[in-house]
Amino acid sequence: MDNAGFGKRLIAYLIDIIPIVLASFLVAYFFLGFDEIIRVYQENKSDANARHDFYLFRNRVRDISFIIWVIYCTFMEPSPMQGTLGKHLIGIKVVDQNGERLTFTRAIVRSLVKILSFLPCGLGIFWIFFNKNKLTWHDMAARTDVVNK
C-alpha cells in the first residue's frame, strides 16, 4: 500500500474543517451572541473584559468545530467512502493494516487518539515526518493507514 503523505492529508483536513468552522462561526454569530461580543471587543480592544470574552468565545467556536470534525471522521472513516469528503476528493482513504475498511470500533479508537495527537502542539500529527511509513499517533494506535486510492 502507498501511504498518503502529509500534504494530501493536510489538504483533505482543510477541505473538511473550513466549512465546519464557518458553520460553527455563523451559528455563534447569528444565534449565540458572538456578534455582540465582537462589536464590544472592536469598540474597545484595550478593555481586558472585552478581550477575555472575545477570546473565550472564539476558542469555544474552535473547540466545538474540532469536536464536530472528530465526530464526523468517526462516522465517515468506517463508511463505504472510507474517509471524509476531503479525503475522498483528494483521492485517499483510511484502511486497517490489512487494507480493509475500518470497523466502527477501530474508527472510535482512531478518533479518540486523534484528539491526543493534536494536544501537545500537534506532535502526534507531525509524527508523520519521523515515521518511515508516514503514520501519525492515531494511525499507530488504531493500526490504520491512510493510503492513496
Image: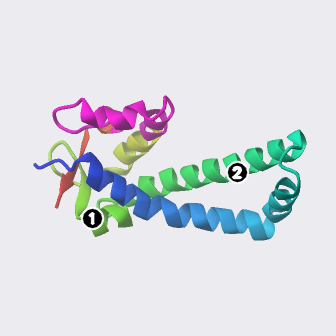
8 vs 30: above or below: above
The residue under the point 59% across, 66% down is 22
Query: Going by the image, does 144 lie left or right of 19?
Result: left
23 vs 99: above or below: below
Residue ID for mark 1: 90
* Residue 110 rendering spot, x and y as whole percentages: 38, 41
Query: Going by the image, does 18 lie left or right of 143?
Result: right
- Of the two numbered discs 2 and 1 in the rendering, the one whose residue sits closer to the viewer: 2
State the extent of the magenta-drawn residues as a range. Answer: 113-138
**Closer to the camera, 23 or 121?**
121
**Closer to the camera, 24 or 53?**
53
- Name the N-terminal-most of marks 2 and 1: 2
Distance between mark 2 and mark 1 Cα atoms: 29 Å
Q: Tag on residue 58?
A: 2
The residue under the point 81% across, 65% down is 35
Query: Going by the image, does 11 lie left or right of 49?
Result: left
